[in-house]
Image (tube, rainbow, N blue to C red):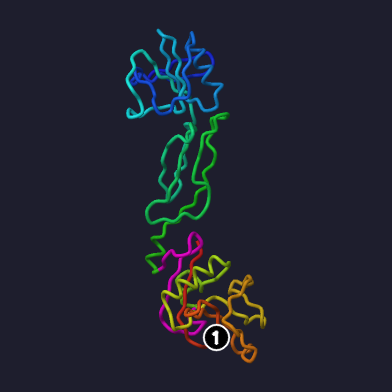
Amino acid sequence: MASAVINIEDFTLITSIQDRIETLHGISVHTIDSLAGCSALCLIKGNCWSLFYNFVTQVCRLNKSPFLAVSETTGQAGFHHYSREYCKGPIPAIPGTTQTFSFVNGIPAVTFACITGAIYISGNKEMTCELGTLQWNTATVVCRDLAPYTALGYTEVCGTESVLKFVGNKVNFDAAKGNCAGGGGHLARPRNTVRWTCLKDYAYTKGVGVHVWMDITDRAQEGVLAFSDNTLVPLPYHWLPGEPLAATKHSADCVAIWPNHRQWDDLPCGNVAFFICEIEL
């Protein structure tokens, strides 16, 4: 590969495929009396990354990508392929991801994907090269390796928010809370409607016929439902019809899922039930 300096911008001569023209990413074809003129035309087009120029016929072919796969070319003697400079800065090594380099609508792009066994949490999965600055924008993808959690018996069932572990041992609320904390988690918290939908379905598949503790009590203030991190439980509440019972409001301070109906039931904290531990990702 040799460099050919054009008076407007550096292009690189791709000698190994100089007799091939691009078939899948062509933009336009022109007759121009110089390589400099052909390169100038490429530079004023927002999606032009390379060109083919025939010094004999003065045919100028503009293309949307700076490199070629043989499957995307066809032999035609006399054309020389020049590739415009594009972003070559370091691509970050983001934990838990693989990277694929490609061109999206003629723009160089790096697409990040979570490795097998990891889950996408948040962020931008794609870095693109800005044609105006030739700088990569920032990829902010976050992938979390699930192996440490699955080793503890947790499974991913609620999208990107958390991993859950169902425990089919009947214990009181405080014992369940302590069991989850001992493994680095907490009793499950329905922080929003989406998470509650996941929890109720998960409880139904695991524990029909037995109450399942969640991390909800009104111990600190009667009638005020809170998680054990002291944040308030958001509305809407999902009580069984008739619950909570006024007659037992001072003795039933903990909340469990009644899986049969996928709704909440208030119980004395000393009652025994199954429970769901959660680790928020």
Which residue is at a point 40% across and 62% down the rendered structure image? 148
Q: Quick check: 14 left or right of 270?
A: left
Q: Quadrant of residue 164?
A: bottom left
Which residue is at a point 49% across and 85% down the rendered structure image? 172
Looking at the figure, which quarter contains the N terminus? top left
Q: Position of residue 105 (x, y in %)?
A: 49, 34
Residue 245 visible in the snapshot:
yes
Q: Quadrant of residue 215?
A: bottom right
Q: Position of residue 25 (x, y in %)?
A: 43, 28
- Residue 177 vertical position relative to residue 49 in the rendered view, above or below: below
Mark 1: give few (<14), some (14-19) or many (20+) Cα within 10 Å: many
Amino acid under label 1?
Cys
Residue 160 highlighted magenta (yes or no): yes
Which residue is at a point 38% across and 60% down the rendered structure image? 147
Which structural element holds mark 1? loop
User: Magenta residues?
Assistant: 154-176
Q: Position of residue 141 (x, y in %)?
A: 50, 49
Q: Quick check: 150 left or right of 280?
A: left
- Residue 68 vertical position relative to residue 163 in the rendered view, above or below: above
Which residue is at a point 49% across and 66% down the rendered structure image? 279
Residue 231 visible in the snapshot:
no
Please give the residue where the numbered disc 1 appears in the rendered image: 269
Q: Quadrant of residue 230?
A: bottom right
Residue 6 highlighted magenta (yes or no): no
Q: Position of residue 252 (x, y in %)?
A: 59, 87
What residue occupies the far bottom of the structure in this picture?
247
